[in-house]
Image: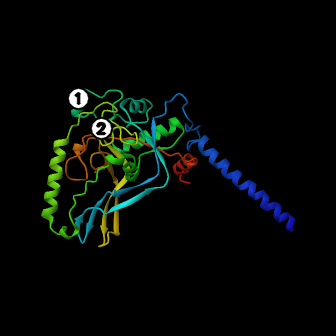
Amino acid sequence: MTKGNKKKCLRDLAVAVPAVLLAVVAGLFVVNAAGRVDRTFQDTKFERPQTVIVAPRSMTYRADGDFQKNNYPVDAPLTTRKLTRSFEIMKYQVSASDYEQCIADGGCQPAEALPHNRNGLSADAPIVGVSYDDAESYANWLSQKTGEVWHLPTDEQWAFAAGSRFTDTALGIADDDAANPALRWLKDYEQQSARKLERSPEVRSAGAFGENELGIADVAGNVWEWTQTCHRRVNIDAYGKIVAETPVCGVYVVNGKHRAAMSSFIRNPKTGGCSVGVPPDNLGFRLVRDGRWYAVVLKRLKEFSI
């Protein structure tokens, strides 16, 4: 092959390879695994959820998990986290009427009716009695409806969105006292007793708990929100560095007035959870929109296991 022909081949490849990749990606949006036209494109009649942009900033943050040092339970280390890229999150929790649309379309299972909401939920009240699995189903349905990618926030994203309403629930026991279990038991007892007095599980209308400084409504009200973060067990060294970590996926972090860990199928927090103490009043959720231009492509590639 002459030098001129080699250059021509390289030019042809430079054009052909992106074209082939583009064709493959385009095919992911048009045809599903069964060979039928896919419903990825936006339903133009569907009203998009109201959202708030969480801008980059730094915050002090204590990660979720059961932390141990020298085989004794301790508070997670307090760290500084930096949000380098803004993200978009729902202003309100997903409402009962929003969730009802998903049920009507066959994308979601009915929520569990809870005794303290015996009079039912108003249309604009947050949906409760829903599991992590239900929230994931709704996120997939909403993604199809809007032609965008919606997902549960991570624990860290939720903390950034919560702002001043994100509560540090550490017991505040010095590491030197960690070997004395009685101290931790007493502190925990005091904390749980205070939480019992704060319980008010009857669901209220959207906006009843006001907005935080970012304009996000009902954060840390009486509806705890699912995140996509797996609960974990962590061992740290004398300097607070993680030396061993065991994620417990299938058990997820829920956030509200305090953190809790719930199995993915739990709808009523009173019936079971993976953390001791006072359970959340209700389980609901709000979603984050992935605004990256290639987010839909990544989602489709993941679905096709490419």
Residue at the disc numbered 2:
129
Closer-to-camera residue (3/289): 289
* Residue 145 in the image: above or below residue 75: above
The C terminus is located in which quarter?
bottom right
Badge 2: few (under 14), some or many (20 or more) residues near its Cα, within 10 Å? many
- Residue type at numbered disc 1: Arg
Position of residue 298 measured from the top left corner of the image (x, y, whole percent): 55, 50
Badge 1: few (under 14), some or many (20 or more) residues near its Cα, within 10 Å? few
Residue at position x 85%, y 63% in the image: 5
Position of residue 66 measured from the top left corner of the image (x, y, whole percent): 27, 60
* Residue 211 in the image: above or below residue 11: above
Dot 1 or dot 2: first in sequence order is 1
Q: Is residue 71 left or right of residue 83?
A: left
Q: Considering the numbered disc 2 on the image, is that residue within a helix, a strand or a loop?
A: loop
Instruction: Count every numbered label the image shows and give the total.
Output: 2
Residue at position x 24%, y 26% in the image: 119
Residue at the disc numbered 1:
118
Distance (Cα) linking label 1 and label 2: 12 Å
- Residue type at numbered disc 2: Gly
